[in-house]
Image: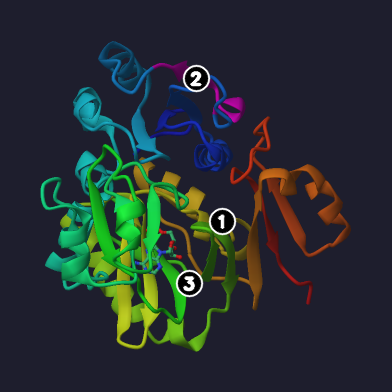
């Protein structure tokens, strides 16, 4: 167990780290952020900041010495240099290795009975046409690694579209387009003793590949499929000896839940838990990695929704406070670039 006053290291300096650090402070911990970008909004609310490259093993080793436990808020961290801090890292880097590669991730989920969309790795020799022939159209070409918020994705309506696409230098995967009724995620926390708790699954709506809105209660189509999705997520967590918050994203379809991807971390679709659950995803993640008892994940309000503030939406966000239902979170990012997650609002109607 990490005692109050102990130091939690966080790999990554974005908004997830910022909200984790705020939850850690409530429990009496200090946070130390490790990130390569000078502008790291998590560092602004933390005691220490190491600004160094992901591959700087000297800086990583020094960071490890300074922390009692280390976690992450960003999964696209090169895994090999993490061996110097692996003994303190939760979750284990194996979870990272799987989540970083869409192909490995789908195979891994299949091992536990998960059903992903039809997929095929794009072979550099046979090319995209061969993959389209196997999977069919419509579909989506995705980079296997480093994609997020719809980046590194190309929609393909027809095999002829493939000619217009210049394959990126990275490895890619081609997936069939899933005709879904709704999207949802399973967010769980797993303690050091293997205890697992789930938050309610909100209904997630994406626009241009970015989460726009999460709401509760979710539609019946989701509620009917949550148990099957939870069973898969907890098998994945157990197989990885996972400690902390794990997210698995699903499409609700007429033939049951289709596994999309996993994130070895707290998730945007769980931000509502700060105001809407007995214990937020951020607090329970901190509790899990520090060996404290897990808190209740129960939803405490009858209905809520969370909307992301993207780009310039954030500039007028304080005006939203006129509505007493609005709980505004701004991440402190200086530049409101298009498509950039700047904050979110959780709407909880007053009863
Ligand atoms: P991802 O980066 O894989 O989470 O994709 C971002 C969003 O694009 C998803 O949440 C869906 O809205 C959409 N999407 C991704 N893959 C598929 C698919 N195979 N079929 C239908 N929609 C998809």
Where's residue 140, x and y in %?
A: 34, 61
Asked if 299 appears above or below 290 in the picture, the reply is below
Mark with earlier residue (3, 1): 3
Residue 190 visible within the image: no
Q: Secondary structure at mark 1?
A: loop
Where's residue 219, x and y in %?
A: 52, 84
Where's residue 235, x and y in %?
A: 21, 66
Residue sitting at the far top: 58
Asked if 31 appears above or below 207 in the picture, the reply is above
Q: Secondary structure at mark 2?
A: strand
Mark with earlier residue (1, 2): 2
Q: Secondary structure at mark 3?
A: loop
Q: Is residue 44 magenta?
A: yes
- The image quadrant that residue 103 belongs to is bottom left
Which residue does the numbered mark 2 point to in the structure image?
A: 49
Q: Is mark 1 within 8 Å of ligand 1?
A: no
What residue do we see at 49% from left, 29% from top? 31
Where's residue 350, x and y in %?
A: 79, 72
Which residue does the numbered mark 3 point to in the structure image?
A: 200
Q: Nearer the viewer, residue 77 or 7?
A: 77
Q: Which residues are magenta?
A: 43-52
What residue do we see at 12% from left, 66% from top? 111
Q: Nearer the viewer, residue 243 or 18?
A: 18
Residue 192 visible within the image: yes
Q: CA distance from mark 3 to mark 1?
A: 12 Å
Asked if 39 appears above or below 25 in the picture, the reply is above
Which residue does the numbered mark 1 point to in the structure image?
A: 271
What residue do we see at 64% from left, 78% from top? 302
Q: Any mark on residue 151, and which?
A: none
Q: CA distance from mark 3 to mark 2?
A: 34 Å
């Amino acid at each position: 167990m990490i005692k109050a006053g102990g130091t939690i290291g966080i790999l990554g300096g974005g908004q997830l780290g910022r909200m984790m650090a705020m939850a850690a402070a409530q429990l009496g911990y200090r946070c130390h952020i490790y990130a390569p970008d000078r502008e790291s909004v998590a560092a602004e609310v933390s005691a220490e900041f190491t600004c160094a490259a992901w591959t700087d093993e000297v800086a990583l080793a020094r960071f490890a010495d300074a922390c009692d436990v280390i976690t992450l808020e960003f999964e696209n961290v090169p895994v090999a240099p993490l061996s110097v801090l692996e003994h303190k890292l939760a979750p284990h880097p194996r979870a990272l290795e799987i989540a970083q590669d869409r192909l490995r991730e789908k195979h891994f989920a299949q091992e536990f009975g998960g059903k992903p969309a039809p997929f095929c790795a794009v072979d550099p020799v046979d090319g995209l046409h061969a993959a389209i022939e196997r999977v069919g159209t419509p579909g989506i070409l995705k980079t296997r690694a480093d994609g997020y918020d719809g980046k590194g994705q190309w929609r393909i309506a027809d095999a002829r579209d493939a000619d217009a696409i210049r394959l990126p230098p990275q490895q890619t995967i081609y997936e069939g387009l899933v005709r879904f009724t709704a999207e949802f995620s399973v967010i769980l926390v797993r303690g050091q003793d293997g205890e697992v708790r789930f938050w309610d699954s909100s209904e997630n709506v994406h626009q241009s590949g970015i989460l726009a809105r999460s709401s509760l209660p979710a539609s019946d189509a989701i509620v009917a499929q949550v148990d099957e999705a939870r069973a898969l997520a907890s098998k994945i967590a157990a197989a990885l000896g996972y400690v902390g918050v794990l997210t698995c994203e699903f499409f609700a379809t007429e033939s049951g839940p289709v596994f999309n991807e996993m994130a070895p971390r707290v998730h945007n679709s769980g931000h509502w838990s700060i105001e809407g659950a007995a214990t937020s995803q951020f607090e329970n993640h901190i509790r899990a990695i520090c060996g404290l008892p897990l808190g209740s994940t129960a939803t405490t309000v009858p209905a809520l929704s969370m909307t992301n503030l993207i780009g310039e939406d954030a500039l007028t966000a304080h005006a939203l406070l006129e509505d007493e239902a609005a709980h505004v979170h701004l991440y402190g990012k200086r530049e409101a670039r298009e498509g950039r997650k700047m904050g979110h609002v959780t709407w909880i109607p007053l009863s």
